[in-house]
Amino acid sequence: MRCESCGKPATQIRDEYSYCDRCWAANFSKTGGVPFRTVLKDSLERMGLMREDGEAMNDWVIRLKAHTPRTLNSLIKQ
């Protein structure tokens, strides 16, 4: 079965619809009525963690992982 939005293989299949994960998230994943991807993008921008121009995906992932322990430690110490 194919995604009814983009034609990629569907992973979210119901009687009412069939979507790939990306299209399902775009249609249904919301936080307080705001699309989750918008919330995530705003959060990454605020933390200075957006992918930089020319930055390889692997380098960005390493940078995100390096930030995570600092963030978790600051939450634990509160």
Image: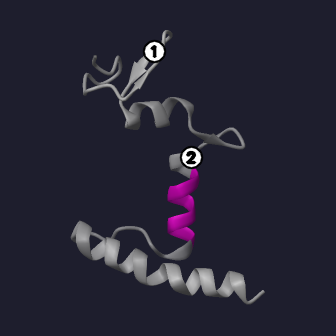
Vertical placement of 3 versus 63: above or below? above
Q: Is residue 1 left or right of residue 73?
A: left
Question: What secondary structure predominates along the stretch shown in magenta?
Answer: helix
Q: Is residue 40 left or right of residue 13?
A: right
SS at mark 1 in the image: loop
- What residue is drawn where x is 54% and y is 75%? 47
Q: Nearer the viewer, residue 35 or 1?
A: 1
- What residue is drawn where x is 24% and y is 71%? 58
Q: In which quarter of the view is residue 59 placed?
A: bottom left
Q: Residues within 10 Å of mark 2 (few under 14, many from 20)?
A: some
Residue 35, position in %: x, y?
Answer: 58, 41
Vertical placement of 77 versus 45: above or below? below
Residue 14, position in %: x, y?
Answer: 48, 16
Residue 42: within the magenta? yes
Colour scheme: one colour
Residue at label 1? 17
Residue, far right:
78
Residue 74: within the magenta? no
The quadrant in which the C terminus is found is: bottom right
Residue at label 2? 36
Q: Identity of the amino acid at label 1?
A: Tyr
Q: CA distance from mark 2 to mark 1?
A: 20 Å
What segment carries the magenta color? 39-46
SS at mark 2 in the image: helix
Circle nearer the N terminus (2, 1): 1
Which label lies toward us, 2 or 1?
A: 1
